[in-house]
Image: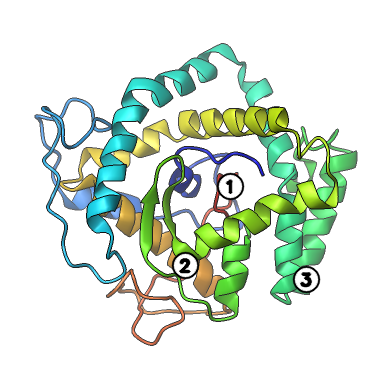
Amino acid sequence: MILPALFPAMALLAVPGPDPQIETIAPVEAQVSAVPASPELADPLSDPATPGGRPTAPPGRIKGDPLEGFNRKMFRSNQSFDKAVYRPLAMGYKHAVPKPARAGLRNFFSNLTEPVVFLNYLLQLKFGKAGRTLVRFTVNSTLGVGGILDLARTEGINIPHRDNSFGNTLARYGVGPGPYLFLPFVGPTTLRDVLGGPVDGAVLPVAIGKPFTDWRYQVASGAITGLDLRAESDADLRALFSGAVDPYATLRSVWLQNRAAEIAEIRHRKSAPTELDDPMEDPGGAGLHDPSGEPAAHIPATSPK
């Protein structure tokens, strides 16, 4: 299984760029602009629990986040590690590796996820999208030199990458999300996606074997995709957290709204009310009101997606 990137939620915010066929998330700017930024916080990515950062709001009784106390501790630990280690490494990678080389590696590893996307579309009985995914994979694997060039996205073919996962498949058939989780080296997720992730990660190792079963490949691919994702999403992370009184709750809300939109699309929900009353509730439940539309499609980190 390919090692997960440290901050997979940012796959919803950036990398590799806006998809012309898919809406990017608008809730980020709306939530950030709704709360005035605090002048005391010099670094919006700093640990909210440390001096100079905003105090973290005490855990509340939010439906769907019964482990909020644990999740907040993991979030603070993640922020501290990100500031001390992960972000400097990611920005160093961005500075040292030329942009064309980074784009080529990004396309290469993204192309390797297409069989997973294809398989899940088949399981979801979305044969048209499965066929388009197969065409995309074939074009990029051959004419695109093993996926280094994303020719399938160019004008004339116009088949962009679309994320899909076994977590989406479970949701398609009525499996609820379970509790919201923030896990070390994983980031925001739900129990459903945690259970579905290993299935996605096992597709290539089981179907092909080496090099996908080799730990050296797993470490290298996880490091490259994780550092690239973190570097490309740095500006979005700062925009997200800079105006947030409670960064944990802000990230949770943005992630859940995007996840709800993904599941709504998988379940063929063409329209939905404009107000999200309970972002923790299963998107298939009667009590949920979520934003419609499709999420941005980017390199998955764990999620999938």
- Dot 1 crowding, Cα within 10 Å, few <14, some 14–19, many 20+: many
User: Which is nearer the eye, 155 or 95?
Assistant: 95
Q: Nearer the viewer, mark 3 or mark 1?
A: 1
* Residue extending furthest toward the top: 96
Residue on which the image places disc 1: 300
Tell me which residue sits at (40%, 31%) in the image.
Answer: 234
Tell me which residue sits at (61%, 57%) in the image.
Answer: 21
Whether residue 145 can be seen here: yes
CA distance for labels 3 and 1: 22 Å
Q: Are marks 3 and 1 in contact (CB under 8 Å)?
A: no
- Dot 3 crowding, Cα within 10 Å, few <14, some 14–19, many 20+: few
Kind of residue sitting beneath label 2 = Ala
Residue on which the image places disc 2: 261
User: Which is nearer the eye, 68 or 57?
Assistant: 68
Residue on which the image places disc 3: 128
Kind of residue sitting beneath label 3 = Gly
Q: Relative to 250, does residue 229 appear above or below in the rendering?
A: above
Residue 176: mark: none
Whether residue 27 can be seen here: no
Would you say 256 lies left or right of 269 here?
Answer: left
Would you say 58 lies left or right of 223 here?
Answer: left
Q: Quadrant of residue 190?
A: bottom left
Q: At numbered mark 1, what does the secondary structure look like: helix, strand or loop?
A: loop
Q: Position of residue 102 (x, y in %)?
A: 63, 25
Q: Quadrant of residue 65?
A: bottom left
